[in-house]
Image (cartoon, grey):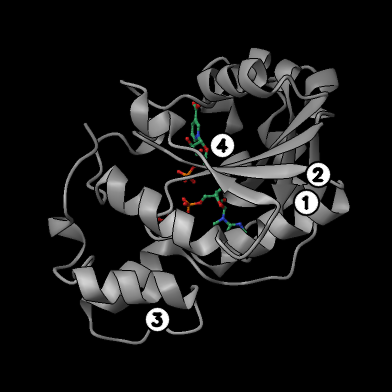
Amino acid sequence: MKLGVMGGTFDPVHYGHLVVAEGVRYEYRLDKVIFVPAGRPPHKADRPMSGPEHRLTITALAIASNPYFEVSDLEIKRPGLSYTYDTIRELQSLYRPEVVYFITGADAVLELLSWHRIRELLAMCRFIAATRPGYNLENLTVKLKLLPASLVERIVPVEVPALAISSSDIRRRVSEGRPIKYLLPEGVEEYVLSTGLYRQGLHQETSFCK
Ligand SMILES: Nc1ncnc2c1ncn2[C@@H]1O[C@H](COP(=O)(O)OP(=O)(O)OP(=O)(O)O)[C@@H](O)[C@H]1O
Ligand SMILES: O=C(O)c1ccc[n+]([C@@H]2O[C@H](COP(=O)([O-])O)[C@@H](O)[C@H]2O)c1
């Protein structure tokens, strides 16, 4: 089995995430892509974010129409910071896949040097770095020059349709009463608007992950 793992804060999930996951699934003929909403993302630990139950629900709504996509609450259930290293280990023992691809956007992959146990993580799974407007993957080898070339080779860039959509822009739009239609799936839009998520602005988001 070839397993894709799409990790993210998903606050909220949007078409940028879905286009990346579907593009990589097709390119690499993945059997399954598991979306893993971060319980407590390590590099955003002191930042307010919506409660995990909201982020899990909207991720499930967003992927419902794709038979290759699944969502996992594994990071949300795990106490402490949500390190990708722990997640991949857990998924490997659950699914016993032949190979795991961790799917990230260019912005996240450019910061890989600061990730927990990055050398071991790169040895355990391959990384797919999807293109993202505003981020240049040509800098990747310079940014990661402290890592052995044999590990950097395990990070593969993939070109996906450029969508300049971000969760932070969507949150800002909601708080300013501007439209978010066509930036994210309708079901997610309805959920966001009906629950009042993001309406009070970034400084008053619903809760911290515990
Ligand atoms: N429009 C996009 N194109 C390509 N990759 C993306 C895009 N949006 C998000 N990603 C990638 O998806 C993963 C999860 O992203 P995340 O949930 O943090 O969304 P975000 O839009 O970057 O959020 P925020 O604006 O709050 O930082 C990351 O690896 C990120 O690089
Ligand atoms: O494990 C780490 O040290 C680590 C550091 C930064 C980011 N990540 C993961 O990378 C994914 C994308 O993060 P984000 O913040 O862009 O949504 C998400 O699954 C995070 O948990 C993981």
Q: Label 2 belongs to which residue? A: 30
**Residue at 64% over, 51% down:** 69
Q: Distance between the residues labelled 2 and 1?
A: 5 Å
Q: What residue type is labelled 3?
A: Ile
Q: Is mark 1 on a helix, strand or loop?
A: helix
Q: Label 3 belongs to which residue? A: 180
Out of 137 and 108, give the one closest to the viewer: 108
Q: Is mark 4 on a helix, strand or loop?
A: loop
Q: Label 4 belongs to which residue? A: 111
Q: Earlier in the sequence, mark 4 or mark 2?
A: 2
- Circles 2 and 1 in contact, beta carbons < 8 Å: yes
Q: Which of marks 3 and 1 is nearer the N terminus?
A: 1
Q: Which of marks 1 and 4 is in front?
A: 1
Q: Is residue 131 visible?
A: no
Q: Label 1 belongs to which residue? A: 25
- Circles 3 and 1 in contact, beta carbons < 8 Å: no
